[in-house]
Amino acid sequence: MLSGILKNEIAVQVSIKIMDAFVEMRKFMNINKSLFEKVVSIENKMDKKFIEQDKKFDIIFDQLQLEENIKQRIFFQGQIYDAYSLIVDIIKKASKKILIIDNYVDDSILNMLTKKKNDVEVVILTSNKSNIQNIDIQKFNKEYPLLKVAKTNKFHDRFIVIDNKEMYHLGASIKDLGKKCFGINKIEDMQIIKQIINL
């Protein structure tokens, strides 16, 4: 810009050299156009691979974090959504069967169970104090089979058993998640899991 304003001989020579440099640069780019396109193509492919790798790492880290979160969690009063979300994550893990033991279960469990995988059988063991209606069970089964509800008075605490191999102890009824402080703990002793299943 300065060489265009100044009128002396040096400014004119600089202006000519700048134009020559631009002409040479354009020639160089035209001659090597296919090479530049290949480089850009390789960069794009590498970017896509790195993005895919990042996504895979994110999935792995999320799963590891989820496993750690599910092992033992304490929820405080008001953490209703967080507790609900964790129960849904546990339900989603099942590939064959979910056993829910909760004396005070109500139809709120049905909303959570809509997140289960298709063809996963659900058995709920509850007491006469539960507030789940047969009509709700029938409607649920038409869209998300298969749910069975049985009455029992053998349990005080609440449990969720996934595929007869993972068990979670809940310190609160599923219908009361997050209303008061409570914990969820993963039970890893297979002997205990078998004893609970066979009660």
Image: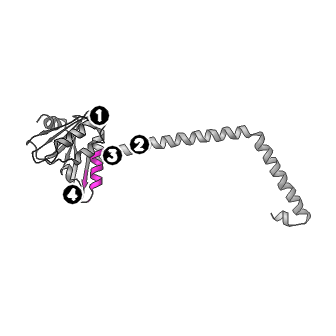
Kindly report the distance in space between the C-alpha atoms of the residues bearing marks 3 and 4. 20 Å
Where does the image place residue 163, in percent across and percent down from the top left?
24, 34
In the image, the segment drawn in magenta is 73-88
Q: Which mark is residue 181?
A: 4
Front position among marks 3 and 1: 1
Front position among marks 1 and 4: 1
Q: Which mark is residue 59?
A: 2
Please rate how many residues cluster around mark 3, counting C-alpha atoms within 10 Å: few if below 14, some from 14 to 19, many from 20.
some
Where does the image place residue 188, in percent across and percent down from the top left?
22, 40
* Front in this rendered view, residue 118 or 167: 118
* Front in this rendered view, residue 91 or 38: 91
Q: What is the secondary structure assignment of the residue under circle 1?
A: loop
* Front in this rendered view, residue 35 or 177: 177
In this view, the residue farthest toward the right is 9
In the image, what residue type sits under mark 3?
Answer: Leu
In the image, what residue type sits under mark 1?
Answer: Ser
Kindly report the distance in space between the C-alpha atoms of the residues bearing marks 3 and 2. 10 Å
Identity of the residue drawn at 44% across and 40% down: 56
Please rate how many residues cluster around mark 2, counting C-alpha atoms within 10 Å: few if below 14, some from 14 to 19, many from 20.
few
Please rate how many residues cluster around mark 4, counting C-alpha atoms within 10 Å: few if below 14, some from 14 to 19, many from 20.
some
**Which numbered disc, 2 or 4, marks the residue that appears first in the sequence?**
2
**Which numbered disc, 3 or 4, marks the residue that appears first in the sequence?**
3
Q: What is the secondary structure assignment of the residue under circle 4?
A: loop
Please rate how many residues cluster around mark 1, counting C-alpha atoms within 10 Å: few if below 14, some from 14 to 19, many from 20.
some
Front position among marks 1 and 2: 1
Where does the image place residue 101, in percent across and percent down from the top left?
16, 42
Instruction: Check disc 1 and report the residue beneath it.
Output: 95
Identity of the residue drawn at 46% across and 43% down: 55
**Which numbered disc, 3 or 1, marks the residue that appears first in the sequence?**
3
State left or right for residue 49 relative to residue 91: right
Is 83 in the magenta? yes
